[in-house]
Image (tube, rainbow, N blue to C red):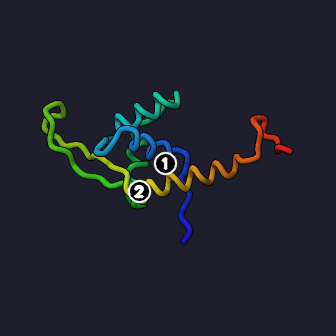
Amino acid sequence: MTREALGEFEQLVLLAVVRLGADVYGVPIAAEIERRTGRAVSTAAVYVTLRRLEQKGLLSSSMSAPTAERGGKARRCVSVTRAGLEALRASRHAMESMWKGLDPGLGRNR
């Protein structure tokens, strides 16, 4: 069975969730990606990607307890599933395989 490859942003989102731990939500995920990559990240793009990753079975979500700071509203928190971890490993393996044998100047090693 072949799996659909993860896109770059999907990988960044999954890795941020892994780094931040279970039951994290979009705003800290966007901040983690920005902090580690130096790239501006839209929280809307993160939420769209979280939804897509959940539809693929790579994330699971649940509603948090309501918080006073949000006026009594709950947050949708996500966790990486086993399938999500497997997809990250497969993606890393594919990239490492493609880089193998290339020097930093992108020429072939002889």
Separation of residues labelled 2 and 1 (CA atoms): 10 Å
User: Looking at the picture, how far across and down is residue 108, in whole percent?
Assistant: 82, 44
Farthest bottom residue? 1
Q: Quadrant of the C terminus?
A: top right
Kind of residue sitting beneath label 2: Leu
Find out whether the residues at labels 2 and 1 contact each other: C-beta distance under 8 Å. Answer: yes
The local secondary structure at tag 1 comes to helix
For label 1, count other residues whose C-alpha is less than 10 Å away and answer few (under 14), some (14-19) or many (20+). Answer: some
User: Looking at the picture, how far across and down is residue 33, in whole percent?
Assistant: 46, 34
Residue 28 in the figure: left or right of residue 63: right
Give me the residue at 39% from left, 49% from top.
50
Kind of residue sitting beneath label 1: Glu
User: Looking at the picture, how far across and down is residue 2, in whole percent?
Assistant: 56, 68
Identify the mark at residue 10; answer none if there is no mark: 1
Question: Who is closer to the viewer here, 32 or 89?
Answer: 89
Identify the mark at residue 58; answer none if there is no mark: 2
For label 2, count other residues whose C-alpha is less than 10 Å away and answer few (under 14), some (14-19) or many (20+). Answer: many
